[in-house]
Image (spheres, helix red, strand yellow):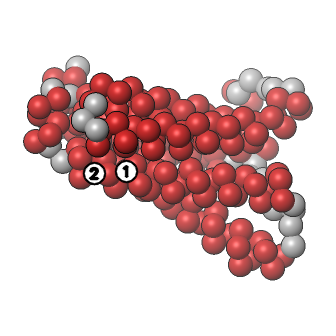
Amino acid sequence: MLSRVRNRVPEVTALLTVVSLALVFGAALQVIPVDALPRLSERAFELIPHVNAVISTAAIVTIVAGVREIRRGNVARHRALMLTSLALFAGFLVLYLYKVTIRGPATFPGPDVIYQFVYLPLLAIHILLAIACIPLLYYVVLLAATRSVSEIYESSHKRFGRLAASLWLISFVLGNVVYAMLYVVF
C-alpha cells in the first residue's frame, strides 16, 4: 500500500484533505446525522473542552520537542514526537467534532466588544490555520511514511514540515486562547 502511495503523495494528500474537511464542515454546519452517534452524559460533554485544552497543550509540547529533536539530528525521536502530535491532534479533532455535531459551536459568554474585536478575529485565525494545516500535515506524514530517512532529506518534507509545524503550533496556541476566553476568563 505504501509503495502505491509513494508515487501519489499529492493526490492522496488531496483526497484525505477533502474527506477530512468534509467531516469538519459537516460537523460545524451540523449536517452529520446525530442519531448515528452515541450519546455521552452531560458531565462528559462538559469535560470535552477541558480535555481538549489538555490535549492541545500536550500537542504544543510534543511539536516543540519534535522540532528540537530534528534540529539535533535525532530522527527517531523526531518521528515519535511528531506522530504523537498527530495522534493528539486526531484525538482533539474527534472530541471537538463530536461535541460540535451534537451540541453546535460554543457560544461566547463575554462582552460584545470583546467578542467582536478580540474573540472572533482570534477564532478566525485559529480556524484558518487549522484548515491550512490539514493538507500540510497529510503531505509531510505521507512523505515520511513512504520514504527512507535518507530519501526524506531529498524530498520537500523539511520545507513543508517547517511550515506545517509553525502553523500547527500557532493554531494550537490560539485554540488554547479561545478555550481560555470561553471557559476561564468569561
Tell me, yes or no, if residue 94 can be seen here.
yes
Residue 63: where, in percent of width, then height? 45, 41
Residue 177: where, in percent of width, then height? 68, 57
Report the front residue among 178 and 37.
178
How crowded pointer 2 is (Cα within 10 Å; few <14, some 14-19, many 20+) is rated as: some
Q: Which residue position holds label 1?
A: 164
Instruction: Residue at 57%, 59% (x, y): give it.
Output: 126
Instruction: Residue at 88%, 30% (x, y): give it.
Output: 43
Instruction: Identify which amino acid the numbered label 2 is placed on.
Output: Phe
Q: Say left or right for 31 vs 17.
A: right
Residue 42: where, in percent of width, then height? 89, 32
How crowded pointer 1 is (Cα within 10 Å; few <14, some 14-19, many 20+) is rated as: many
Report the front residue among 169 and 140.
169
Instruction: Residue at 29%, 43% (x, y): give it.
Output: 71
Q: Which residue position holds label 2?
A: 160
Quadrant placement of the C terminus? bottom right
Report the front residue among 103 and 138.
138
Image-quadrant location for residue 16: top left
Which structural element holds mark 2?
helix
Which structural element holds mark 1?
helix
Residue contact between numbered discs 2 and 1, judged by CB atoms under 8 Å: yes
Instruction: Identify which amino acid the numbered label 1 is placed on.
Output: Ala
Image-quadrant location for residue 121: bottom right
